[in-house]
Image (tube, rainbow, N blue to C red):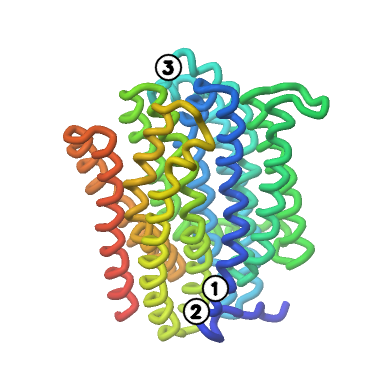
């Protein structure tokens, strides 16, 4: 077939990044609303279901991070294939990445399904919450492959510069989930009243439909998916290319929910109300960070195509734009969340103790959101360049070297406020380190 157009190697850099990121903002905003909408409706069931769902957050994020990592590897490999003008390689990489993701996700989720009770007991869930957690996660695990496979499939679209299609699909899926949630949770329109399990069933139905549509788009609309049955040597070569970036990116992304799991364990000492309040805050947080997630989602393909095409000046310009935007927009976010924190918490709960924890989190941690956005974008840039190890080292040091020691000390001194302050301080330090490291790498 003729070479796929490397659409990201020409034109105004700021205009191109903006046009790529905007569709992703709306799509990701809709996708992130899955958790917020689920939390809103589940909160109406009472504190116990809300606390049960909060305990599941680190595991949900862990598997989501697996998809993000594999998607990063796929996007990087496919973007460099497109940038180099090798269309067949791009097709083969996209197809084989989908196969690999399906195999891995089914295996991991089967293990997770079989170990629900011991895992969440280890995370600190009480005996009264375990039946609720099992009710939710036994269904959620079945839906997980239908989340991970589309994430990887659609990463190939970003690699081609087609973020608009992904944004539209994600938006439609989120609206469908939001409509289905109250029907299955509360038993509306003649449906059975499933309670907490209804949120999981809504997720399963929505993700299954998303999987079908995503594969149709890649196979029929853009002709990126080809016959998945390939010689073993070809499969291994493709998987190595994807895993070269995907495995470190996966590990880097999994470090974050592992830290979240530790935070949940720390907060559990303060009672179920504190865990419920944290659950509200950490579900609002991804929505607040949506612009940074969208930007990092397109930075990888941008750096991958331009690096393969030898456009170093465009890479240096993009890094300067990242610094100015992340710092400025991050400060604006912090001001908004500090002011609206009580109102946001009040949307989810009328329990003062639960709301207080959410408000304190949203007053302290967002100060560092700009720096955290810079970390995400720099990590995506390293992955796009095909050099994933700096991103992994940054993520590893962020959690193990800085956050956990700081969290232990500051929580001892100031309780929950100290724990939240440790997160903010860590983000600022790692953000400065990531930007400087990327600048040195581009100057070499």
Query: Which quadrant of the view contains residue 202?
Result: top right
Mark 1, residue position: 18
List x then y, in percent, for residue 214.
71, 55
List x then y, in percent, for residue 143.
64, 37
Residue at point 49%, 65% (across, down): 295
Q: Of helix, strand and loop, which one carries label 2?
A: helix
Residue at point 36%, 57% (across, down): 372
Q: Quadrant of the C terminus?
A: bottom left
Residue found at the far top of this picture: 127
Sort mark 3 into few (<14), some (14-19) or many (20+) by Cα contacts within 10 Å.
some
List x then y, in percent, for residue 240.
50, 58
Q: Does residue 360 appear in this view?
A: yes
Q: Earlier in the sequence, mark 2 or mark 3?
A: 2
Q: Nearer the viewer, residue 4 or 427?
A: 427
- Residue 142 in the image: above or below residue 426: above
- Residue 273 in the image: above or below residue 102: above
Q: Quadrant of the N terminus?
A: bottom right
Mark 2, residue position: 14
Spatial CA distance of label 1 from label 3 is 46 Å
- Residue 90 in the image: above or below residue 282: below
Residue 126: numbered disc: 3
């Amino acid at each position: 077939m003729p070479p796929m157009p490397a659409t990201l190697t020409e034109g105004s850099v700021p205009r191109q990044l903006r046009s790529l990121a905007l569709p992703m903002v709306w799509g990701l905003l809709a996708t992130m609303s899955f958790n917020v909408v689920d939390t809103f409706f589940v909160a109406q069931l009472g504190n116990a279901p809300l606390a049960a769902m909060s305990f599941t957050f680190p595991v949900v994020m862990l598997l989501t991070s697996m998809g993000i990592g594999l998607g990063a590897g796929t996007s990087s490999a496919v973007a460099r294939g497109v940038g180099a003008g090798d269309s067949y390689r791009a097709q083969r990489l996209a197809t084989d990445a989908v196969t690999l993701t399906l195999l891995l996700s089914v295996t991991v989720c089967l293990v997770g399904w079989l170990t629900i009770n011991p895992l969440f007991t280890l995370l600190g869930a009480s005996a009264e919450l375990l039946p609720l957690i099992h009710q939710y996660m036994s269904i959620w695990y079945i839906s997980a492959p239908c989340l991970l496979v589309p994430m990887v499939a659609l990463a190939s679209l970003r690699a081609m510069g087609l973020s608009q299609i992904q944004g539209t699909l994600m938006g439609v899926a989120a609206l469908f989930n939001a409509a289905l949630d109250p029907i299955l949770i509360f038993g509306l329109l003649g449906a059975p009243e499933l309670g907490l399990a209804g949120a999981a069933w809504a997720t399963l139905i929505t993700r299954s439909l998303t999987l079908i549509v995503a594969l149709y788009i890649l196979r029929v609309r853009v002709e990126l998916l080809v016959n998945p049955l390939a010689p073993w040597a070809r499969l291994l070569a493709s998987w190595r290319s994807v895993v070269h970036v995907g495995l470190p990116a996966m590990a880097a992304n999994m470090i974050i929910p592992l830290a979240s799991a530790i935070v949940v364990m720390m907060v559990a000492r303060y009672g179920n109300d504190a865990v419920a309040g944290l659950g509200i805050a950490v579900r609002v947080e991804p929505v607040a960070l949506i612009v940074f997630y969208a930007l990092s989602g397109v930075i990888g393909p941008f750096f991958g195509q331009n690096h393969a095409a030898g456009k170093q000046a465009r890479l240096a310009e993009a890094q300067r734009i990242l610094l100015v935007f992340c710092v400025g927009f991050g400060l604006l976010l912090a001001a908004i969340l500090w002011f609206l924190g009580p109102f946001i918490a009040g949307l989810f709960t009328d329990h003062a103790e639960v709301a207080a924890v959410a408000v304190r989190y949203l007053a302290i941690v967002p100060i560092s959101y700009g720096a955290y956005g810079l970390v995400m974008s720099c990590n995506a840039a390293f992955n796009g360049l095909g050099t994933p190890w700096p991103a992994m080292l940054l993520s590893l040091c962020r959690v193990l070297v800085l956050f956990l020691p700081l969290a232990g000390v500051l929580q001892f001194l100031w309780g929950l406020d100290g724990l939240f302050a440790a997160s903010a301080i860590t983000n600022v330090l790692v953000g400065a380190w990531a930007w400087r490291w990327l600048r040195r790498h581009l100057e070499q």
